[in-house]
Image: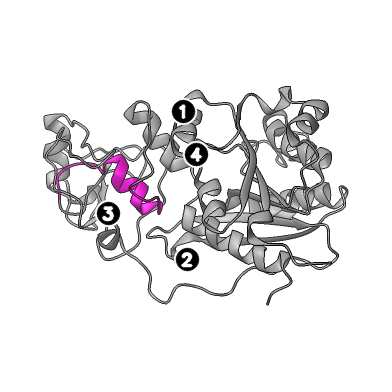
Amino acid sequence: MAQKKQADLTYIDLFCGAGGLALGFEKAGFKNIFSLDNEPNFCKTYRANFPNHTLIQSDISKIDAKEIKKILKKQHVDVVIGGPPCQGFSMAGSIGRKFIADPRNRLFREFARVIKIIEPEYFVMENVARLYSHNKGQTRAEIIECFSNLGYTVSCTILNAAEYDVPQSRRRVIFVGTKSDLPFAFSKEKTNRIKTVWDAIHDLPTLEVGASSVIPNHEAMRHTPQMLKKMAYVKDGGDRSQIPLPLRPLTGDSRKYIRYTSTEPSVCVTGDMRKIFHYSQNRALTVRELARIQSFPDSFVFTGSKISQQQQVGNAVPPLLAKMIAQRLKKVIRNEK
C-alpha cells in the first residue's frame, strides 16, 4: 500500500467549538472534510477563522447516516476528532448507573454513533482528565469497550498541555482508536523548557481597566472599584489570603481571587477567568491573553460577546497540543517511526 501524501490526510471535527483541535490538525497537514457544532457564537468564530471549511451548525443527533454519507461524497476519512461534552460524573457509578447509560452523556453516544457510520481509520477524542479515573476506572473501561465493539483498538492517556509548548497546566484525557490491531503509541517527545505566563503575554500592550488596543481581542474588562481594591492586595502568584479580612471573600471557589504566577505556566483556562488577575496589572486577563495561554496565534480572532469569547477560548483544545497529536498520528498513518 502506497504511503499517503500529506495533502491526502483527511479529518472530520465533531463538537468543533471555535476550532482549537481543527487548527492543530490543519497545522499538521490534515485536510478538513467537514466540522460540526451547535452553538451559534462558536460557529461564527469558526467560520471567521476557517472560511474554506464546511461547517454544519446543527445538533449532532439531527444528522442521520444518509445525510452524513451525502456530505462525504465517498471521500476517504482518515480520522474523526472531537471532544463530546460528558457531564454525568456525579450520578454515573454512584447509584449503579453506567456512564454510557446516563442521559446527560447522550453526546458521547452521538459521537460513537457517527464513528460507526463513517468508519474512519482513526478517531481522537478529548475530555477532562477526571474521566480517566472516574468510578475507579470503570467509566474509562466503558468507553474503551464501546469503541472496541465498533472494531477499534483504543489507547488512552492523560496529557498535560504544559509539556507540549503550551504555557498552561491543562490535563486532559485523550482516547485514540485505530482500526489496526496495534495500539496507538503517544509521543514521548516533550518540550525542553516549560513556557510561563510571562513568556506568553509579556509583550502585549499594557492596558488600564476598560481600555483596548489594536490587537484583536486585547480589550480589558471593567471591574468595580471594590473588586479593584481587593485585587490590589494580591501579589504575583498570591491568593485571597493577602486581602485584608474586612474585604476578603470568605466563601466561594478557592481558585478565584488569585494572581497568575508570572514564572510558571498558567492555571487551567476555563470559560470564566474574571476573578484571576494579571500578574502585574490590576485587571483580569483579556481574551487575547487567554488565547495566547491556550496557544492560539494572534491572527485567530474570536467573535461575539466578551463572555462568549472567554467560553470559546476556555472550551478549546490548545492548538499546539492538538498539533502534537496530529503529527504523531500522521507518522503512524505513514508508517514512520
The residue that disc 4 covers is 50
SS of the residue under disc 2:
helix
18 left or right of 73?
A: left
Q: Disc 1 or 4, which lies upstream in sequence?
A: 1
Q: x, y percentage for residue 126?
A: 61, 49
Q: x, y percentage for residue 207?
A: 14, 43
Q: Nearer the observer, disc 4 or disc 3?
A: 4
Tell me how far mark 1 sits from mark 2, CA to CA: 28 Å
Q: Who's the residue at 82% across and 30% down the image?
A: 65
Amino acid found under the numbered disc labelled 3: Tyr
The residue that disc 2 covers is 164
Range covered by the magenta-colored residues: 281-298
- Work out whether 289 lies above or below 305: below
- Quadrant the N terminus occupies: bottom right
- Quadrant the C terminus occupies: bottom right
Which numbered circle lies on residue 294? none
